[in-house]
Image: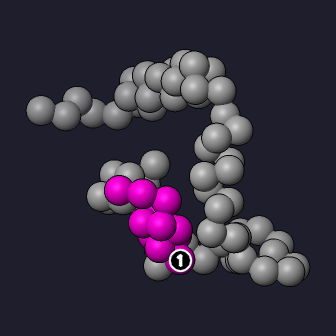
């Protein structure tokens, strides 16, 4: 999501964003290696699009109630 908002246009852009902006090793124990090139596409392909859509909309509504209006 952050990568897309910052202009990512494909999976390579998403991977590059994560490499530059977030060191995942500081948050998760990667004992063997960092994510493979196909990790993000495989993850998102595994999601049910309708269920993701509903959950995302619910999340946006929830956080928008606690945020000031954007003009």
Residue 23 in percent (x, y) is at: 60, 77
Q: Please give the residue where the numbered disc 1 appears in the rendered image.
A: 19
Q: Main secondary structure of the magenta part?
A: helix
Report whether residue 62 is seen: no
Q: Nearer the viewer, residue 45 or 16?
A: 45
Report whether residue 60 is seen: yes
Queried whether the magenta region covers residue 13, the answer comes back as: yes
In the picture provided, is 69 more to the left or to the right than 62? left
Vertical comparison of 54 with 47: above or below? above
Instruction: Look at 38% across and 52% down and name the residue there.
Output: 4
Vertical comparison of 46 with 33: above or below? above
Q: Nearer the viewer, residue 58 or 51?
A: 51
In the picture provided, is 61 more to the left or to the right than 24? left
Q: Which residues are magenta?
A: 9-19
Instruction: Look at 86% across and 80% down and name the residue there.
Output: 32
Residue 33 in percent (x, y) is at: 78, 80
In the picture provided, is 34 more to the left or to the right than 3? right
Residue 51 in percent (x, y) is at: 62, 21
What's the coloring here?
A: one colour
Queried whether the magenta region covers residue 22, the answer comes back as: no
Residue 19 in percent (x, y) is at: 53, 77
């Amino acid at each position: 999501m952050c990568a897309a908002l910052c202009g990512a246009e494909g999976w390579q852009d998403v991977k590059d964003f994560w490499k530059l902006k977030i060191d995942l090793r500081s948050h998760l124990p990667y004992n063997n290696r960092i994510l493979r090139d196909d990790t993000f596409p495989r993850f998102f392909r595994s999601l049910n699009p309708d269920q993701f859509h509903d959950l995302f909309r619910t999340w946006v509504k929830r956080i928008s109630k606690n945020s000031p209006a954007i003009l």
